[in-house]
Image: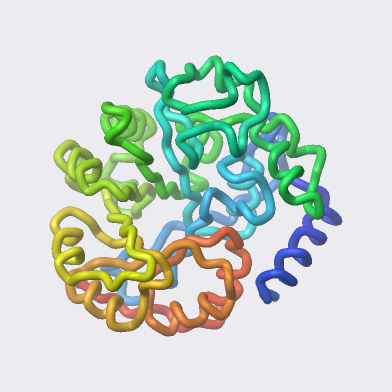
Amino acid sequence: MIRTSGTLALLMATVFAACGGDEGAGRSSPNGSPSTTASTSTEPTVTDADERAVTVVAHRGASAYAPEHTFAAYDLALEQGADYIEQDLQLTSDGELVVMHDETLDRTARGPADSCTGPVRTKTLEQLRQCDVGSWFNEAHPELADPTLVELRIPTLREVFERYGDDARYYIETKAPDTRPGMEQALLDLLDESGLTEDRAIRSRRVIVQSFSAESLQRIHERQQDLPLVLLLRTSGTPIDPSQLDDAAELAIGIGPAAANVDAALVEAAHERCLDVHPYTVDDPATMTALLAAGVDGMFTNVPDVLLAQRSEAPVLPAHCG
């Protein structure tokens, strides 16, 4: 297990107080020891179903409770019942895909300066193996500090797939792809190798790839036309122009706008174009309620358990495209 039951209960109580809010078989623990946690993963519902539940995407894992983009955060998100775990991709200097949000190591990595500071793209995988990406969480959240989080390592995308296999669904973002040519091909090669571009995986949307770069998504679409793609929109505080939806509909199955930009009118306009709407990043229960009422198809959240509780009270969604 990721934490003792007492520690986990404390974490839940702490975040519920802040947010107002109220399982992966055969895995090893974040530090490699066996786990007896049972998987709660189920096949996803897709847009051509008669009815579907709002999709819960664990933003960097259950990252309100554990260090982002670590096995601790992913394990906990799946234990809570999240539909997808998110991976932000960086490409190392020797061509390995690793999972980290920032382009630089400074915020979340601790270790030798030559290996654990500066841009990820300038480091080899061997260098990144020296970095601890758990200690920063204990420093930033002393009320949630846990000694088992110390010495957590940066996972490769390959390791994520090997750890969870069919017990998880993956929502993958190509980060700054224009600065690291070859990211898309490396991703597609690994998806192929892992069986995640097979018909069964495509039909069930086992993988969704997102990016703020339409060019990155276009490169993926040219090589793998059936892979579900989502275009992220940097639009916080600015109305979304209908032309952005038209452009997204050319290659994507959905859009990822900032939550502040989402209302029922946007959702209706997106659905008219057969686009799902997955706003980011929503931790406040009142905002979750408003977005559910607006008809969104999914949300990114750092607190999957809170959104799951909200979803359990919400009606299922009708299909918006046949």
Q: In this view, does 311 lie above or below 156?
A: below
Tell me: 19 left or right of 178: right
Quarter of the figure that contains the N terminus: top right
Nearest the camera: 202 or 236? 236
Q: Residue at x 35, y 50 (%)?
A: 208
Q: In this view, does 210 lie above or below 189?
A: below
Q: Where, by quadrant of the figure, is residue 303 drawn?
A: bottom right
Q: Is residue 94 visible?
A: yes
Q: Residue at x 28, y 73 (%)?
A: 239
Q: Where, by quadrant of the figure, is residue 315 drawn?
A: bottom left
Task: Residue 176: give x, y in percent of width and height.
Answer: 35, 38
Q: Which residue is drawn at 58% across and 72% down?
A: 284
* Colour scheme: rainbow
Task: Residue 23: give x, y in percent of width and height.
Answer: 64, 54
Q: Can residue 24 be seen in this view?
A: no
Q: Which residue is drawn at 42% across and 69% down?
A: 259
Tell me: 80 left or right of 193: right
Tell me: 130 left or right of 239: right
Task: Residue 150: give x, y in percent of width and height.
Answer: 75, 34
Nearest the camera: 101 or 170? 101
Quarter of the figure that contains the C terminus: bottom left
Q: In this view, does 198 lie above or below 282?
A: above
Nearest the camera: 226 or 87? 87
Task: Residue 244: give x, y in percent of width and height.
Answer: 19, 64
Q: Is residue 68 above or below residue 292?
A: above
Q: How many marks?
A: 0
